[in-house]
Image (cartoon, rainbow, N blue to C red):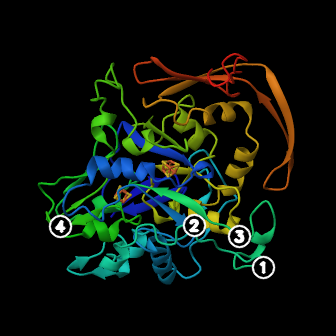
């Protein structure tokens, strides 16, 4: 095994392949607080890519209700239990020392690659700890939709969770697709070398000619996003709508600039922002604070990776839901949760401006600029951590630019309003 650096863990880790990095990396930020579970994203993906025979159960994009929902069923709980059994009480974070290259501290436990050494799967050694879900776990994709956890009267299993601002009874929607990981477990596990990561944008693809359907990728992916097609007998996964990323949609992208994927572009709740972030030759995120994804993930740490402890360095990031017990969120998004929520609940003017960019254009925004506006409000609030804060709100204008540097969106913090004329009450 080679040694690679995983910034989300704040340390090096073992991985079956040497470091090799793309120039740009496909990445996205989802604001869980805004999702209404309309499943428009899910259907946009399904109707574009997985409507053929053998793909009936494939939901490359899905939105599940947590804590009980999951597709396949219990995908995360099962793997967390396997890791815990492998390293009892050892799956912990040390958060005292943080640096720009270890913003959440250091993970002291075992990743799925490190925990695999004692395990063998059918037909050979295991490169990543995992399992193949049985058929019944791929049924009922939206099982336990909106089933809440918690008790009204007594302390529940999450200890202090009955204290506000967390809710006594809670659930939330988790939007999921392939994370196009920096260290993909699917790629590491494939005995045919059929899975590759594109050097130009970091998108992870399965070569349909080379795949023989051994399902090692299904077993290894901790997020269970490769899926086996029993008609063609090969595996398939999200392809990140790569023709759109390549700017091949001439109507929507006249200057051949990259477009967001179908699931992002269709999002009704405006929770999704997708981008391509610059990487340096040694795999670090380049300093690029004017890129909105870079700003939210690396400058502000307000959007956090999903289960960073699995070790694949996923490139999907989430603004955590405000009302959910912190211990649950920390397990899911790592120890950066408290800081992220304090910032989200009382955003400064720059963060508030960038939050307006979600779903204002189908073009991928490579750069933003803020034009300052007048102060419109001042609000006193108590942060989730208990500290007091005063939020000043300014009606700033945020402008987004595509890859060619062309302006593709312009939006103010205050939503424009129109007053109907007295003569035409039903029109504007
Ligand atoms: S989420 Fe799973 S399928 Fe996607 S790149 Fe990561 S390991 Fe591979
Ligand atoms: S389209 Fe947006 S709001 Fe609707 S379920 Fe998907 S992520 Fe949530």
Q: Which residue is mark 1?
A: 155
Alpha carbon distance from label 1 to label 4? 47 Å
The local secondary structure at tag 1 comes to loop
Please state the horizontal and vertical placement of residue 94, each as a whole percent of the image.
64, 64
Q: Is residue 8 left or right of residue 336?
A: left
Q: Residue at x 68, y 31 (%)?
A: 350
Q: Residue at x 52, y 72 (%)?
A: 144
Could you classify mark 2 by the number of other residues whose Cα lies within 10 Å: few (under 14), some (14-19), or many (20 or more)? some
Alpha carbon distance from label 3 to label 1? 11 Å
Alpha carbon distance from label 1 to label 2? 21 Å
Q: Which residue is mark 4?
A: 213
Sequence-earlier tag: 1 or 4: 1
* Residue 158: quadrant of the picture: bottom right
Please state the horizontal and vertical placement of residue 426, each as a whole percent of the image.
63, 25
Seen from the viewer's position, the closer of residues 242 and 423 is 423
Sequence-earlier tag: 2 or 3: 2
Sequence-earlier tag: 3 or 1: 1
Please state the horizontal and vertical placement of residue 40, each as a whole percent of the image.
44, 49
The local secondary structure at tag 2 comes to loop
The local secondary structure at tag 4 comes to loop
Q: Residue at x 65, y 52 (%)?
A: 98
Seen from the viewer's position, the closer of residues 97 and 306 is 306
Seen from the viewer's position, the closer of residues 157 and 96 is 157
Q: Residue at x 25, y 51 (%)?
A: 196
In the depicted structure, whether residue 404 falls above or below residue 181: above
Cβ atoms at labels 4 and 2 below 8 Å apart: no
Q: Which residue is mark 3?
A: 169
| Residue 278 is at least partly visible in this image | no
Does the residue tagged 2 have its C-beta within 8 Å of any atom of ligand 2?
A: no
Quarter the N terminus occupies: bottom left
Q: Which residue is mark 2?
A: 146
Could you classify mark 3 by the number of other residues whose Cα lies within 10 Å: few (under 14), some (14-19), or many (20 or more)? some
């Amino acid at each position: 095994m080679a040694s690679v650096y995983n910034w989300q863990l704040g340390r090096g880790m073992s991985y079956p392949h040497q470091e090799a990095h793309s120039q740009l990396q496909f990445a996205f930020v989802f604001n869980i607080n805004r999702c209404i579970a309309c499943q428009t994203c899910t259907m946009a993906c399904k109707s574009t890519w997985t409507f053929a025979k053998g793909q009936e159960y494939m939901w490359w994009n899905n939105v599940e209700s947590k804590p009980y929902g999951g597709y396949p069923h219990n995908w995360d709980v099962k793997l967390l239990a396997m890791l815990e059994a492998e390293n009892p009480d050892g799956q912990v974070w040390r958060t005292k020392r943080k640096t720009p290259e270890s913003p959440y501290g250091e993970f002291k436990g075992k990743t799925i690659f490190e925990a695999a050494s004692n395990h063998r799967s059918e037909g050979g050694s295991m490169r990543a700890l995992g399992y193949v879900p049985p058929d019944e776990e791929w049924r009922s994709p939206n099982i336990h939709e909106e089933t809440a956890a918690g008790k009204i009267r007594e302390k529940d299993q999450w200890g202090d969770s009955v204290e506000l601002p967390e809710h006594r009874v809670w659930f939330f929607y988790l939007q999921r697709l392939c994370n196009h990981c920096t260290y993909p477990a699917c790629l590491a596990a494939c005995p045919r070398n059929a899975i590759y990561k594109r050097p130009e944008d970091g998108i992870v693809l399965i070569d349909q000619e080379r795949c023989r359907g051994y399902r090692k990728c299904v077993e290894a992916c901790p997020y269970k996003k490769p899926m086996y097609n029993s008609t063609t007998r090969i595996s398939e996964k999200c392809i990140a709508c790569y023709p759109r990323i390549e700017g091949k949609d001439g109507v929507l992208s006249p200057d051949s600039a990259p477009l967001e994927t179908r699931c992002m572009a269709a999002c009704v709740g405006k929770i999704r922002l997708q981008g391509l972030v610059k990487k340096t030759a040694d795999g670090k995120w380049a300093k690029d604070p004017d890129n909105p994804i870079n700003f939210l993930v690396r400058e502000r740490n307000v959007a956090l990776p999903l289960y960073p402890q699995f070790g694949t360095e996923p490139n999907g990031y989430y603004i955590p839901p405000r009302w959910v017990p912190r211990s649950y969120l920390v397990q899911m998004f790592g120890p950066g949760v408290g800081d992220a929520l304090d910032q989200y609940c009382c955003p400064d003017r720059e963060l508030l401006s960038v939050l307006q960019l979600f779903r204002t254009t189908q073009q991928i925004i490579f750069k933003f600029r803020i034009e300052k506006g007048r102060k419109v409000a001042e609000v006193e609030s108590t942060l989730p951590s208990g500290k007091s804060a005063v939020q000043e709100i300014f009606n700033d204008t945020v402008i987004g630019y595509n890859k060619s540097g062309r302006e593709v969106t312009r939006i103010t913090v205050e939503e424009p309003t129109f007053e109907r004329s007295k003569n035409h009450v039903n029109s504007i």
